């Protein structure tokens, strides 16, 4: 299936509410506003098509890029290609899908985390902190959690909003998974106040770290 055919198919699935929501959370005009479920359904039919995925990515269309993430073969991307792709991101949901489906299980993820977390590029740094949050949750044995909390406490308030989001995730993961660091993680969250007043839909957990930590810990006890 050709890129033009895919774009035409995506256009037929345009949804006004999705388009408006995307605009509200930072999307530009290069989009059709396709529902995530519809994008996933197309990906299931295509399955893995690395060449097509790369072509769709180059369009910079939001819906095409989300689809591309699902059909690209992550193992065929070099570190240089990964960096170029992350730097070209300009929409947070794309960054999150890219982190989840392309970067999270990359065999070079530790190297990428160590390199990216200090980047001046906000999307690269966001990805680096996302990798760190994942390592804290799943494999933190080699990490200095006290030093990580020191850095979050000193840097998160002045970080770019895109980076704050995944730094905050790292903060919450420390508090959720490590009782010996929980009080300090909560204290840092209270002190910085980031996402304290973040609007949350009914039934969803607030991203405000103290609330997030306490909610997840309470679930562990049930």
Image (cartoon, rainbow, N blue to C red):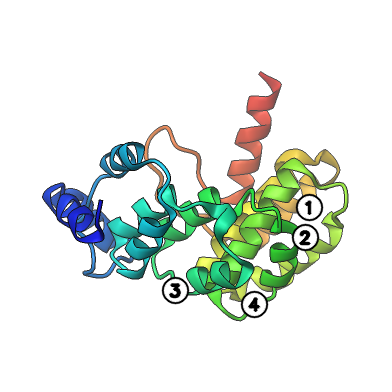
Image height of 118 relative to 68, above or below: below
For mark 2, give the secondary structure: helix
Indicate which label's residue lies in the foreground, 2 or 1: 2
Badge number at residue 129: none
Q: Which residue is mark 2?
A: 149
Question: Gap between marks 2 and 1, in whole Å?
Answer: 8 Å
Q: For the residue carrying disc 4, how many other residues have a C-alpha within 10 Å: few (<14), some (14-19), or many (20+)?
A: some
Mark 3 or 2 closer to N-term?
3
Q: Is residue 180 left or right of residue 78?
A: right
For mark 4, give the secondary structure: loop
Disc 4 vs disc 1: Cβ atoms closer than 8 Å? Answer: no
Disc 2 vs disc 1: Cβ atoms closer than 8 Å? Answer: yes
Disc 1 vs disc 3: Cβ atoms closer than 8 Å? Answer: no
* Location of the C terminus (image quadrant): top right
Question: Gap between marks 1 and 3, in whole Å?
Answer: 36 Å
Badge number at residue 119: 4
Q: Is residue 146 left or right of residue 94?
A: right
Disc 4 vs disc 2: Cβ atoms closer than 8 Å? Answer: no
**Residue in view at x 65 percent, y 53 percent:** 106
Question: Gap between marks 3 and 2, in whole Å?
Answer: 29 Å
**Residue in view at x 50 percent, y 45 percent:** 206
Indicate which label's residue lies in the foreground, 1 or 3: 3
Q: Which residue is mark 3?
A: 88
Indicate which label's residue lies in the foreground, 3 or 2: 3
Q: Is residue 190 left or right of residue 165?
A: right
For mark 3, give the secondary structure: loop
Q: Quadrant of residue 28?
A: bottom left
Q: Which residue is mark 1?
A: 184
Residue 55 in the image: x percent, y percent? 35, 64
Question: Gap between marks 4 and 1, in whole Å?
Answer: 26 Å
């Amino acid at each position: 299936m050709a890129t033009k055919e895919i774009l035409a198919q995506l256009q037929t699935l345009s949804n006004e509410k999705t388009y408006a929501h995307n605009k509200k959370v930072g999307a530009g005009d290069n989009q059709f506003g396709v529902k995530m479920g519809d994008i996933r359904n197309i990906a299931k039919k295509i399955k893995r098509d690395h060449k097509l995925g790369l072509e769709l990515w180059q369009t910079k269309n939001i819906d095409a890029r989300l689809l591309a993430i699902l059909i690209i073969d992550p193992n065929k991307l070099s570190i240089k290609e990964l960096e170029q792709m992350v730097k070209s991101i300009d929409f947070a949901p794309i960054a999150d899908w890219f982190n989840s489906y392309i970067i999270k299980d990359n065999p070079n993820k530790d190297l990428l985390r160590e390199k990216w977390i200090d980047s001046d590029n906000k999307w690269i740094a966001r990805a680096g902190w996302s990798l760190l949050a994942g390592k804290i949750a799943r494999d933190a044995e080699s990490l200095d959690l006290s030093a990580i909390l020191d850095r979050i406490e000193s840097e998160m308030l002045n970080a770019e909003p895109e980076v704050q989001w995944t730094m905050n995730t790292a903060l919450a993961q420390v508090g959720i998974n490590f009782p010996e660091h929980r009080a300090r993680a909560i204290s840092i969250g209270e002190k910085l106040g980031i996402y304290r007043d973040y609007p949350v839909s009914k039934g969803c957990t607030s991203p405000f770290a103290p609330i997030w930590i306490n909610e997840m810990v309470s679930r562990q006890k049930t």
